[in-house]
Amino acid sequence: MNKQSPPFVSEKVLAECEACIGRTREITDSLSPEPAEKFCILMDRKPPGEELPPTFHWAYFSKGIPLADLGPDLHERTGLFLPAAPFHRRMWAAGEVSVSQPLRIGTPATRRSTIADVAFKEGNSGAMCFVTISHEIEQNGVPCIAEKQIIVYRDRGEPETALRQPDEPVPDGYFTHPESQLFFYSALTHNGHRIHWDRAFCRETEGYADLVVHGPLMATELCEAMRGSRLSIRFRYRALAPVFTTTPVRILPGTPGTERKGTIERSDGTVSMSATLTSL
């Protein structure tokens, strides 16, 4: 039975989006070492060993997208796999990655993705559509990673303001993400989303103050700061506020322990991402 249609969405749109629940997509990747090596260079860390660090699988399982299937934002257009939500802004809202067994680099693995839920909500920032996708990754027939990814779609809101201008100093203890890092991360993850490289699109179409730092890039930064040498973990994260290339941030990895809580905090005190990491 369909959910009751919220006032800002027609019953037809709601039914079409709900019909996507259960839709699946399967991708097999060779897990060649090059993406992992490039990821480590991008993160300024040592090359990986034989096992892939948690969240580094985001550099794999990228499906090539024909030009005819691209939307105006250069993501795969909605309605093919993801539901045709009636909003234009798209971003990672939250997720959970559980690594029961690390993936071995160089051994093929298969990811099966399923649309688990579609929910429309109205909050302080306006109407939104939350799409939950579950991912199961196995290698040699053994389940290795279970992941829940939540994507949010929303309309353009009020224009965002920048915390600092590009020529202003970065406060002590904080850092910014250079445009080059965003460019190479987009290339590494086969992500054409224009909010990460097209400044005019950011400002004029989506109302952002500047280029937007990728949510999964920040999630990996936070996970790497929190996990130490652990590979079998559960990492839950939530994006709370946007970060631009001009935004000073700092990583607060929290107190070490079986369960560790960390954040990425902007220089204005706003938490842009929170996370909990648990050993398995």
Image: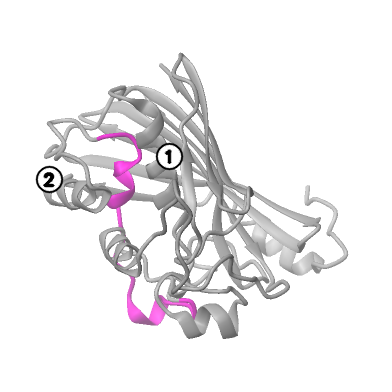
- Residue labelled with disc 1: 222
Magenta residues, start to end? 53-73
Q: Residue at x 48, y 61 (%)?
A: 81
Q: Position of residue 43 (x, y in %)?
A: 27, 48
Question: Overall secondary structure of the magenta stretch?
Answer: loop
Q: How is the image coloured?
A: one colour
Question: x%, y% of residue 65?
Answer: 33, 70
Q: Is residue 42 magenta?
A: no
Residue beneath label 2, please?
33
Amino acid type shown at disc 1: Leu
In this view, the residue farthest toward the right is 7
Q: Between residue 55 and residue 107, name the one nearer to us.
A: 55
Q: Tell me which numbered mark, 2 or 1, is placed earlier along the sequence.
A: 2
Circle 2 crowding by C-alpha within 10 Å: few under 14, some 14–19, many from 20:
some
Of residue 28 and residue 202, the one placed in the foreground of this image is 202
| Quarter of the image where the C terminus is located | top left
Amino acid at circle 2: Pro
Q: Secondary structure at mark 2?
A: helix
**Residue 198 in sight in this render:** yes
